[in-house]
Image (cartoon, grey):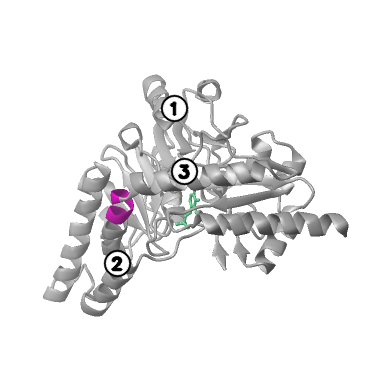
Amino acid sequence: MVYLDYAATTPLNDEVLNAYTKLLKQYYGNSDSLHALGREAAKLMETAREQISDLLSVRKEEVLFTSCASEANNLALKGYAFHYQKRGKHLITTAVEHSSVLHTMEQLEKQFGFEVSYLPVNEQGKVELESLKQALRKDTILVSCMLVNNESGAINDISVLADYVHAFSRAAFHMDGVQGLGKVELPLDAVDMATFSAHKIYGLKGSGLLIKKQHVELLPLISAGQQEQGLRGGTSNSPVNTVFAKTLRLALEKQAEHTAYVKGLNDYLREELAKLDHIIINSDPSGSPYILNFSCLKIGSEIMLNALDERGFCVSAQSTCASHTKAHSYVLSAMGLGEVRATHAVRVSLSHLTKQSELTSFIEALKEIIHDYQIR
Ligand code: PLP
């Protein structure tokens, strides 16, 4: 089997697994208990919070543990919108966000009377400052924009967008940084809130972070105990939260080396795909090297994915969270690439674990599938 779906999730790092197993067995105390076992669990989790804050150059109090990035996005957007709604009810996001942002925005719009502007993207999949300028209003309270798109790999100029928002409005800026963590530089200085996930960087599933700068207030979505500054009650998952620090350290330590290697893989795959008939590459070369999206104009996404699956290749057509809906990429549509490319897309996502020989066999499989399909 050849796994080329690392943007969907990654295998667990052995060091993380070992540390996690040890924590589960030995440090099972409730981190809010006052006895020794509780205090030990709390100490480990708070040390991890400090390590994460050092690694990300934010304050310790600005690191909130969540159960996943989808929860962090919900907390950032709803928590902020509910808290600041007296200031204004206008929100801005982009047309190509992950479902955890888009569906949250839709809910705020439909159920809670907020107005949402969805910024378009250009052919490279990036948000242009001009469209943000046009959308920003006096009553805008929050702007949410992703760092790296999970389908196209496009990287947004977050600092430019956030600086504009801060200079010309009272709105806060939230960044979904999930596909950028451990891969591209993080513009954390420029934003008020940021979301991350452990399972995209060889960590545990069900583990996320919300970075919330100290001046930002949120309304809690889970009303319960004092955990996470009262912003998400419920017994802390201290072993999971504790190993996030190791997961992050390992990812950041090797970021430059891994990214240079993956860039080489991406270049190779691009060159090989360019030699094939009926293939158009959808990801701009300026994007993240970890994601390469292309369309085979003769074969729809579903058929292609099944054919690749039969040959042992794991790839996606679109965001995994939307993979059970009709195979149509709203991201590629928003990029203006047309209906055919949006319904014929394949997303390959790469890792430092990917071998060039795996990409060579992937290309061979593609050639075979295209050939078989043509003579049918
Ligand atoms: N944001 C982006 C850009 C993603 O790619 C994903 C996962 O696919 C998420 C958010 C959600 O992450 P999680 O699985 O931790 O909820």
Judged by its main secondary structure, the magenta piece is helix
Q: Which residue is mark 3?
A: 263
Circle 1: element type: helix
- How far apart marks 3 and 1 lie (CA) works out to 26 Å
Q: Amino acid at mark 3?
A: Lys
Mark 2 is on which residue type? Glu
Q: Nearer the viewer, mark 2 or mark 3?
A: 3
Check if mark 3's residue and mark 1's residue have beta carbons within 8 Å: no
Q: Position of residue 358 (x, y in %)?
A: 55, 59
Q: Which residue is drawn at the image coordinates 33% and 37% (left, top)?
A: 188
- Residue, x 44% and y 58% (percent of image)? 353
Count of marks, rendered view:
3
Q: Check disc 2 and report the residue beneath it.
A: 15
Which mark is nearer the camera, 3 or 1? 3
Q: Position of residue 268 (x, y in %)?
A: 55, 45
The single residue placed furthest to the right in the displayed view is: 376
Residue 261 vs residue 340, the one in the foreground: 261
Q: Describe the element under mark 3 as helix, strand or loop.
A: helix
Return the disc, 2 or 3, that comes first in the chain's sequence.
2
Q: Which residues are magenta?
A: 248-253
Q: Quadrant of the C terminus?
A: bottom right
* Vertical comparison of 115 with 206: above or below: above
Identify the residue at the far bottom of this view.
25
In which quarter of the view is residue 369 placed? bottom right
Task: Classify 186 as above or below 255.
Answer: above
Label 2 – label 1 distance at C-alpha: 37 Å
Number of other residues with Cα within 10 Å of mark 2, as a class: few under 14, some 14 to 19, many 20 or more: some
* Earlier-in-chain disc, 2 versus 1: 2
